[in-house]
């Protein structure tokens, strides 16, 4: 029997991300004594919740060969929508529905631009991001929407006095997307579109319809993330979501989702979000400038994509 030659890239694909998380955790603990405090670790969990939920949507899109640059802004817009509805009606349920519907409508518009008018996804979603931002500022007058005390439990509540309530929503989103990607025909279509769109069309799959559905589901997740942001801030902030899409994309790619499409999953979301959360936290604890933090994230994306390209070449 022929002995298989050890491959670093093969080993990294299977186990590398877990070693990175462990190593990063140890390094963070050694650098700053406050890092391992329970209150700080719970703060990390809170920080990764919104990123992970948005990253679930980005994962589906990237697996299908697309991307969404509007996700962060849509979360902020949906959060303001939720706050406005909550203040007007007093209904938490309606606030959730309004936020999710807001995300779905804007993302469906992105899907239409991509499928009907054949715009590249990054152009379409960038346009929708600007539209959503303008609508949000026009409605709010660039002011926060207050009076959302009824969802304080979502932003500050804890299960058994330890686990933040919002973390349960993150876990629920990850489980839902995992089931969709792994156990449904829709999930198979997502991977198929990202792997070879022309072959998928030839197989009789309605690619455009599936792309629109992916955008809509991603938009619904942005809406959920928006409600959580509003609960955390205890107000609807028109500018609070900007930038979350880049953290989500970084988490998705660093976690192992292939930027070229066809490869990825929810474990990538969770692992990548943990890495981004740990990095953000330790950099904040060390009072590192936000500008340097942007540089670190940019380098991370570049390295992750380079590694993805290298591993893909070796698999051929």
Image (cartoon, rainbow, N blue to C red):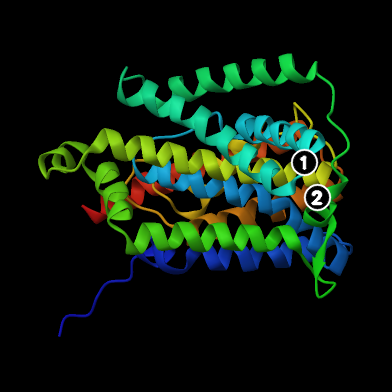
Residue under numbered circle 2: 151
Q: Is residue 166 above or below residue 115?
A: below
User: What residue occupies the far left of the structure in this picture?
Assistant: 202
User: Closer to the N terminus: mark 2 or mark 1?
Assistant: 2
Q: Is residue 181 above or below residue 93?
A: below
Contact flag, marks 2 and 1 (Cβ < 8 Å) = yes
> Horizontally, is 166 left or right of 130 in the view?
right
Q: Residue at x 43, y 57 (%)?
A: 265
Image quarter in which the N terminus is found: bottom left
Q: Is residue 298 in view?
A: no
User: Disc 2 to disc 1, how far (Cα)?
Assistant: 8 Å
- Disc 2 element: helix
Numbered disc total: 2
Q: Residue at x 58, y 17 (%)?
A: 131
Residue 73: quadrant of the picture: top right
The numbered mark at residue 230 is 1
Q: Is residue 157 in view?
A: yes
Closest to the camera, between mark 2 and mark 1, is 2
């Amino acid at each position: 029997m022929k002995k298989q030659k050890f491959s670093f890239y093969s080993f990294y694909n299977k186990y590398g991300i877990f070693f990175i998380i462990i190593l990063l955790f140890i390094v963070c603990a050694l650098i700053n004594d406050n890092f391992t405090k329970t209150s700080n670790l719970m703060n990390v969990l809170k920080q990764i919740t919104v990123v992970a939920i948005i990253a679930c949507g980005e994962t589906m899109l990237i697996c299908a060969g697309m991307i969404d640059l509007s996700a962060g802004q849509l979360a902020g817009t949906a959060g303001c929508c939720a706050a406005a509805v909550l203040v007007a009606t007093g209904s938490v349920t309606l606030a959730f529905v309004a936020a999710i519907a807001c995300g779905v409508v804007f993302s469906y518009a992105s899907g239409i631009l991509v499928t009907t008018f054949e715009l590249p996804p990054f152009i379409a979603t960038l346009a929708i991001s600007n539209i959503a931002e303008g609508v949000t500022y026009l409605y709010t007058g660039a002011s926060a929407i207050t009076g959302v005390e009824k969802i304080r439990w979502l932003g500050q509540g804890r299960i058994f006095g330890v686990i933040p309530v919002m973390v349960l929503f993150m876990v629920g989103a990850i489980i839902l997307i995992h089931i969709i990607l792994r156990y449904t025909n829709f999930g198979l279509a997502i991977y198929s579109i990202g792997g070879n769109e022309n072959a998928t069309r030839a197989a009789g799959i309605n690619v455009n319809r599936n792309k629109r559905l992916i955008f809509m589901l991603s938009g619904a997740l942005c809406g959920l993330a928006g409600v959580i942001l509003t609960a955390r801030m205890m107000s609807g902030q028109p500018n609070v979501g900007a930038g979350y899409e880049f953290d989500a994309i970084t988490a998705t790619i660093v976690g192992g989702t292939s930027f070229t499409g066809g490869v990825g999953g929810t474990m990538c979301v969770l692992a990548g979000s943990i890495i981004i959360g740990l990095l953000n936290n330790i950099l904040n604890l060390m009072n590192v400038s936000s500008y340097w933090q942007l540089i670190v994230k940019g380098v991370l994306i570049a390295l992750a994509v380079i590694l993805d390209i290298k591993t893909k070449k070796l698999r051929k």
